[in-house]
Amino acid sequence: MFAERIDFSHEASLTIDELIKRAEVLLPETDVSILRRCYDFADKHHSGIKRSSGEPYIIHPLNVAATLIKLKMDLDSIMAGLLHDVVEDCDVSPEEISKLFGQPVAQIVVGCTKISKIKFKTKEESQAENFRKMVVAMAQDLRVIIVKLSDRMHNMRTLQYVSKEKQAVKAQETLDIYVPLASRLGINSVKGDLEDLCLRYLHPDIYYRLAEKIAMKKRERESYINETLALIEEKMLEYSVTGEVTGRPKHFYSIYKKMQQRGVDFDQIQDLLAFRVLISNITECYKVLGIIHSAFTPVPGRFKDYIAIPKVNNYQSLHTTVIGPKAERIEIQIRTFEMHEVAERGVAAHWKYKDRNKGPEANKLKWVEELMEFNQNVSSSSEFMDVVKNDLDVGGVFIFTPTGDVKELRYGATPLDFAYAVHTEVGNKTVGAKINGKLVPLKYRLKSGDTVEILTSKTQTPSKDWLKICKTSRAITKIKQYLQKVEREEHRTQGEEILEKALKKFETSIKALDKKQEFKPLLEKYHYKTVEEIFVNLGSGHLPLKEILVNIPSIAVTEEDEIEVPVEEDDSYHKRLQKTARKSSSNDNAVIVDGLDDIQVKMGRCCNPIPGDPIAGIITRGRGITVHTVGCSRISDIEKGRQVNVDWNKNYNFSHPVNIKVTTHDKPGILSKISKSINNAGINIRSAIARSMPDQKGNFIFEIEVKDYSELLKTISSIEQMEEVISVNRA
Ligand code: MN
């Protein structure tokens, strides 16, 4: 058996009998005879219509259905493949399809039709809008996109029959939209073929030059491939490992991309050949890797272990580049048969075993769901597009959690992105981050291999500035959601107050009117679901007070009446202030102790907490409460019963002394340089101790005064930026 890549070529003489035969092989337990009814129905409606190639139209849906069988999709998808154009092209109603072939099939066809109606324009904004719609379609049923990809595959396969202009438009659209989608869904077989087809129509000169060069050396190359294959198999046999070994030229597009990236010519590109070893289990994958590395010299820096750390689209494989038998570089991929299924079919490979709660499938849907959530939270399509494009970029950095788990985030991601990737609550409460044990600013760019520890505080809340720091759609969505919730709540209370005040003049109240269902006409008119929505829209200024009053039946206000809008007066503001004041009983306490007033609070000298540090309190015998950082060894030594919850008092605004230790290269004038930098940031230095070490290093301890943790972080990072500085730590 030869596990080659899936062949998507156009089959001009494909018949429904042949298609049904293939479906029976794929789905042996299922009655697939309904496919003939789908075919007859589609054929009847497309009859007399010809494709640009001159072939009867029905050959197109037949080929689309064949592709879906090759991707091992379910019966509904194959049926939808046969029917995918009848709503769009033949004005068949979705209801009719639903009646004849079931609701799920109708829904997939409708989804495909919606995507087809998207008009692509050159303007970035409209293209983004289209992409947005595709994601919406995909969220409803992932199968819509897989049918659509199969449709696009066949259209690209037969693109030679349409006009030059249309070729360029379709190819660009495919490269911009369909290729990234196929990649993100892990359907690499479709992705690779689509890319090569795009290259053929977008850069025909390059495509044909590559084709020519590869064809010229065809015989030579084939014998070289066979020789190498035999060599690999022989070596494997020596260690009694058996598997399938295949070799082939790489995809043109990947060669083209490499030429562009390295800025080199075709002649300088060396590794044109790719070999693949498929074996039965993971242990043997690493064994084969060892065999290959001992038989051929590996090229340093080219080994990648996607088995231990899969790509975000769940791709798994070992990749290595070695110097082949004729001193030519060859790329070798090693993976199990199962991994190969996933590599070729991606999300489609899991179709039959679909379980929404488990496995890679769940991740994929989660990804789509996150995009959907984001979709609801952005106002402009280009903003959406930016984020989507970033998310579709499969490459990224691998980050370790303190417990050794690995997360992949996109390039440029920050500790804050990481915090949101761990959990929304962790993200919302983030006050700082340690990379490999060292404090860094939140906007630090994560690098592969970093171990990230997130520091949180109960009192922390997300701010608008965080949107500038975060790079992942998940983090941005969650921050926006939080900010919107806060804003909505403000508008709601404002709106409610304004309305209540206005109603007093009519000697009624919100409660009384609500009881009599007096808000009903207004709710209906604006499609609001609750009275709260009236408050929110009034508070935010979207709904004028007069409009509300006009629509309350028992209040005889007309459009012509003058309405005086009650100004939000100071008393409500004062009430709010009083509330917060009561919450934090005394403003000269830096720390609020849960449920306890007027208690003596001291800061632990061992760890010297400053506002923003995660803290806990310990009840000390007869001396009130001592506050320590959560990480302080004192906390872990004390039994839980003596611990109390404490929190920083947000109204407290005094400076705290804290020590920082700076290690530098020993250069003259360094002390004054550091001092100047601290002072320039508006930070007071209480004392400084300098010591020069025998190893040409300088050691300084500065006692500085900061308001809180973030000010400390800022100071540390500004010192870190100095050339002579080796490290800065809180001491
Ligand atoms: Mn079609």
Image (cartoon, rainbow, N blue to C red):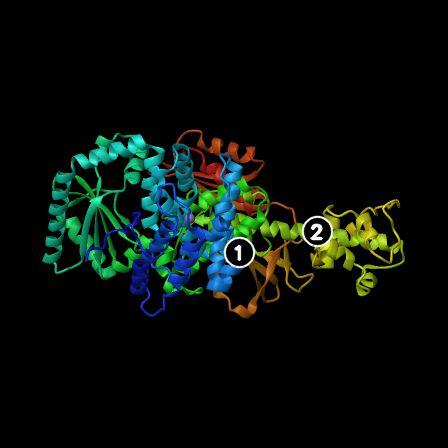
**716 left or right, relative to 324:** right
Which residue extends farthest front?
48
- Seen from the viewer's position, the closer of residues 568 and 561 is 561
* In front: label 2 or label 1: 1
Label 2 packing within 10 angstroms: few (<14), some (14-19), many (20+): some
- The image position of residue 613, as x and y in percent, is 54, 52
Between marks 2 and 1, how big is the CA–CA gap? 47 Å
Helix, strand or loop at label 1? It is: loop
**645 left or right, relative to 443:** right
- The image position of residue 396, as x and y in percent, is 39, 46
Three-letter amino acid code at the position of disc 1: Ser
- The image position of residue 511, as x and y in percent, is 81, 62
Q: Is residue 180 above or below residue 211?
A: below
Q: Which quarter shows the N terminus?
A: bottom left
Residue 40 visible in the current orientation: yes
Residue 702 visible in the current orientation: no
The numbered mark at residue 93 is 1
What residue is at 16 percent from the left and 36 percent from the top?
Answer: 217
Three-letter amino acid code at the position of disc 2: Glu
* Residue named by callout 2: 490
What residue is at 43 percent from the left and 60 percent from the top?
Answer: 362
- The image position of residue 265, as x and y in percent, is 26, 29
